[in-house]
Image (spheres, helix red, strand yellow):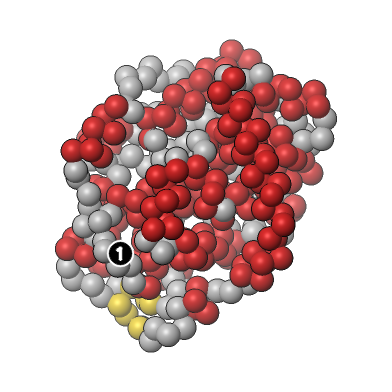
Amino acid sequence: MDNLLCEESWPASPLTPEALPNSSHSTHNDRNNVMPMYPEIDDATMEEAISVDLEKELCFSNHGDKFTDFFVSKGLTEFRFQAVQWLLQTQSRLNLSFETVFSAANCFDRFVYLTSCDEWTNWMVELVALTSLSIASKFNDVTSPYLQELQMDGLNHMFHQNTVLKMELIMLKALDWRVNSVTIYSFSQTLVSKIGVIGDHMLINRITNHLLDDLCDLKMLQFPPSVVAAAAMCNVVEENGLRGKIMDLFTLEQKNNIVKCVDMMKSRSIDRSRRKTFEVKSFLSLLQSVDVKDDYYVEDLSAIFKILRSDNKKRERENNHFNFRPAKRVSI
């Protein structure tokens, strides 16, 4: 646990919403009902928060062509999409925070990429998705749902509590206990405050809806979270002045990536109908050939989920690990 405390010394975004009774979270089906309350942040603190997040995402290095190529090569593209859809459906059903679902998807992607499984089965994908959400909810929500609640809908297997707890430990060790990664949602919150559109609830909802679509799009893993967040906001914001404020925060190389990301977002509207048709399918329809188990218990998870610890991956992690100075915590 000491390692966990050290690794998680990063400050939360100063733009983290303050919880309000019965309105701290939004639902996936009706996201326009709820608006988070953002604290007022001075410019100096905001600049520091943006700088810290930009450095922090380099440390995690959870993006790039390697991620998308891996999912495609392993035949996990549709499974990954359905896993994210299940995360969104469960977030809506249990009224979890948006940050929880984005963090869960982040854990899912990073863990799957680290494993050396030759063949993924249906129950393995379900277990990783379930475990990712369980871990993320413990880090991001005030109260974490019971495992039985998480498994009430959308899964083909009912996993035993001991199986999930063992899987949590395996996943946390594989991720080096580093769960507090920058996500496209967390970075967007900082940008929303920076460009001064906190009170525009309709715009913020449109940005959130856009980011949820981006979360489902495997191609978005090619870009850093900051680039996807900025591209989504540029795609939604209509005023050129606000777009300029966003772009001014980035280097020339980052700006070029944002433009490329925006173009990729616009191009996917061509196959929007196919995505919507596929979106209505549940995990059950994709896994219909599997018999439902009332209590699925797996004994030897470590042997099944083999974690890559090659010199190349160690070197990659070390090269992207910098000695960052923690940002000042904000008193509200």
Residue holding disc 1: 164
Local SS, label 1: helix
Locate residue 9: give its quadrant: top left
The residue at 30%/50% (across/down) is 114
The residue at 62%/32% (across/down) is 258
Spot the residue most to the top: 44
The residue at 52%/61% (across/down) is 81
Specify whether 168 is left or right of 38.
left
Residue 284 visible in image: yes
Specify whether 139 is left or right of 2.
right
- Between 313 and 130, the one lying in front of the other is 313
**Quadrant in which the N terminus is drawn:** top left
Tell me where residue 253 appears, x and y as whole percent: 55, 23
Tell me where residue 90 appears, x and y as whole percent: 53, 64
Amino acid marked by disc 1:
Val
Specify whether 195 is left or right of 254.
right
Q: In the image, is residue 95 above or below residue 294?
A: above
Q: In the image, is residue 19 above or below residue 93?
A: above
